[in-house]
Image (spheres, rainbow, N blue to C red):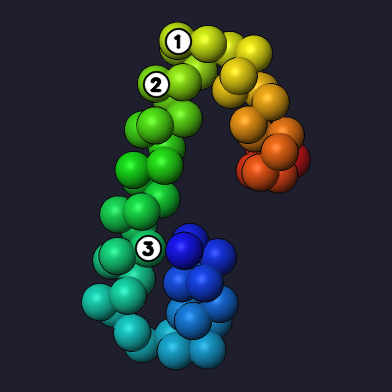
Amino acid sequence: EILALNDHLSVHKKDHHSYVGLMKKIGHRRNLLAYLRNKDITRYRDLIKALGLRR
């Protein structure tokens, strides 16, 4: 969903409602990843690698 919203916003730059939704989803993902990093660092690293998030 985040990638789809990102593509949508690259075309519709003034769609602020979708931008707010994107920021909410990114924040939720960040919080879940922070929780996983604190609980199980190996699963966190595997997930980051699988999703290709951190470069």
Residue type pointed to by label 3: Leu
- Cβ atoms at labels 1 and 2 below 8 Å apart: yes
| Residue placed most toward the observer, 27 or 45 | 45
Which label was assigned to residue 28? none
Quadrant housing residue 48: top right
Residue 14's place in the image compared with 35, above or below, is below
Residue in the picture at 50% in, 18% down: 37
Residue identifier under label 3: 22
**Image spot of residue 8 (x, y percent):** 49, 81
**In the rendered structure, which disc, 3 or 1, sits on the residue that comes first in sequence?**
3
Q: CA distance from mark 2 to mark 3?
A: 20 Å
Q: CA distance from mark 1 to mark 2?
A: 6 Å
Quadrant of the image for the C terminus? top right
Q: Residues within 10 Å of mark 1 (few under 14, many from 20)?
A: few
- Mark 2: which secondary structure? helix
| Residue placed most toward the observer, 30 or 13 | 30
- Mark 3: which secondary structure? helix
Residue identifier under label 2: 35
Residue in the picture at 30% in, 65% down: 21
Residue 10's place in the image compared with 52, above or below, is below
Residue in the picture at 36% in, 87% down: 14
Quadrant housing residue 44: top right
Left/right placement of residue 3 relative to residue 46 reads left
**Image spot of residue 9 (x, y percent):** 47, 79
Left/right placement of residue 44 relative to residue 46 reads left
**Image spot of residue 47 (x, y percent):** 63, 31
Residue type pointed to by label 2: Tyr
Residue type pointed to by label 1: Lys
Q: Residues within 10 Å of mark 3 (few under 14, many from 20)?
A: some
**In the rendered structure, which disc, 2 or 3, sits on the residue that comes first in sequence?**
3
- Mark 1: which secondary structure? helix
Residue identifier under label 1: 39
